[in-house]
Image (cartoon, coloured by chain):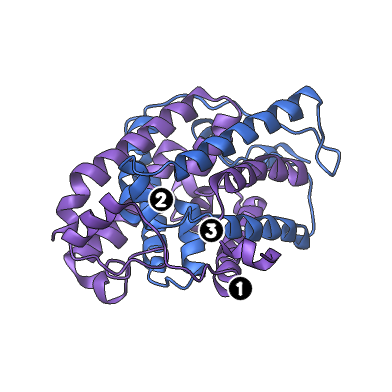
Chain colours: A blue, B purple
Amino acid sequence: MNIKDQNTDFETRSLDTVCINESQLEHKWHHNLKYLVIGILFGIVFIKAEVISWYRIQEMFRFQSFHMYGIIGSAVVVGMISVFLIKKFNIKTIYGEKIEFHDKTFNKGQIYGGLIFGLGWAITGACPGPLFAQIGTGATVMIVTLLSAVAGTWIYGYFRDKLPH
Amino acid sequence: MGILELIREPWPWYIAGPLVGLTVPALLIIGNKSFGISASLRHTCAMCLPANIKFFQYDWKKEIWNMFFVFGILLGGVIAFSFLSNPDPIIINANLKTELASYGITEIYGMLPEQLFSWENLFTLKGFFMMVIGGFFIGFGSRYAGGCTSGHSISGLSNLQMPSLIATCCFFVGGLIMANLILPFILSL
């Protein structure tokens, strides 16, 4: 493996460390089907627990229901325990790779971007994951919202150097 | 009550939350992937319209797993909606119901109020704010923040990252401001 493969956009990623693909292994495309399966299960949970419900999000932001707090809270607890166990017992991937964790660095984007994201979250009642699931339930108009989110991402990329970070 | 009937009921938080949380180790163990969804929006830009923007100049093919994952979420939506739908009407908080009724939103069923989110409403001012501007904020804000509820609030917090805690608090403050202070104006448009 040459250095180019490892550091395709290192500088960008140093500011934006979410969703880094840690694996250096090369796989055939069908290995990606396992992510499809996880996605399907995840999407079913989203629908069945009404995480994608606009009403549940409105209840959350009005402190009218514990449901969403319970979901996010228990998800974080389970996630924390899992990460702790993976680190403690040095659990490897199914391919025998070491599981890597990256520390995120603070920048002001987490504040400004976070606030903007929150505004969008409460209007649409959806974050990016639920958007996909909502489209799946036949709310086809949410394709427009998804495309608009892609446009927002693109505009961010375009003005990125000029924005405070 | 049979298993299928049980699955069709809305799932309680203490079932759904841990399942969402388990996505974090599942993705790590099957391929060293950090759970995150908004990155798929960035990959879409990198794939379709990189336009010489440095932020979109990277090998998106290496991140294709993320597109499989989000497409799976969409398929999960199709499956749950087609086969596992809850036949009963959705129950919402009485105060919310009263508030929504004051804006003329009385048809409470499904996941989204059709009186707000529909193709017919897309070209009204209200609909434009809710579907187009709302989506734009989600995409712009999540990338600016370096992640969304999954990447920061679930993944990041699971790994005890302070920046993720800050981002999560800001997501929430933004949501509180919108839902309680701004949304009433939009809904009465």
Q: Looking at this rendering, what residue extends furthest in the bottom direction?
A: B120
Mark 1 to mark 2: distance in Å? 34 Å
Q: Looking at this rendering, what residue extends furthest in the front direction?
A: B1
Along the line of sight, the residue nearer the viewer: A62 or A138: A62
Task: Tell me, yes or no, whether dots 2 and 3 are on the same chain.
Answer: no
Counting other residues with Cα less than 10 Å from the Cα at mark 1, is it few (<14), some (14-19), or many (20 or more)?
A: few
**Would residue B52 appear left or right of B72 to someone viewing this image?**
left
Secondary structure of the residue carrying tag 2 is helix
Please indicate, yes or no, whether residue B9 appears anywhere in the rendered image: yes
Q: For marks 1 and 3, give the one nearer the viewer.
A: 3
Q: For marks 2 and 3, give the one nearer the viewer.
A: 3
Task: Tell me, yes or no, whether dots 1 and 2 are on the same chain.
Answer: no
- Estimate the x, y position of residue B134 in percent, counting from the top left: 31, 54
Secondary structure of the residue carrying tag 3 is loop
Q: Residue at x 33, y 49 (%)?
A: A58
- Estimate the x, y position of residue B27 in percent, counting from the top left: 69, 45
- Estimate the x, y position of residue A60 in percent, counting from the top left: 37, 44
**Residue A153's disc number:** 2
Q: Residue at x 25, y 44 (%)?
A: B178
Report in which chain the residue with disc 3 lies. Answer: B
Tag 2: amino acid? Thr
In the rendered image, which quarter contains the C terminus of chain A?
top left
Report in which chain the residue with disc 2 lies. Answer: A
Give the mark, 1 or 3, whose residue is nearer the N terminus: 3
Q: Residue at x 30, y 42 (%)?
A: A62
User: Where is mark 3, residue-wise?
Assistant: B10
Counting other residues with Cα less than 10 Å from the Cα at mark 2, is it few (<14), some (14-19), or many (20 or more)?
A: many
User: Where is mark 1, residue-wise?
Assistant: B83
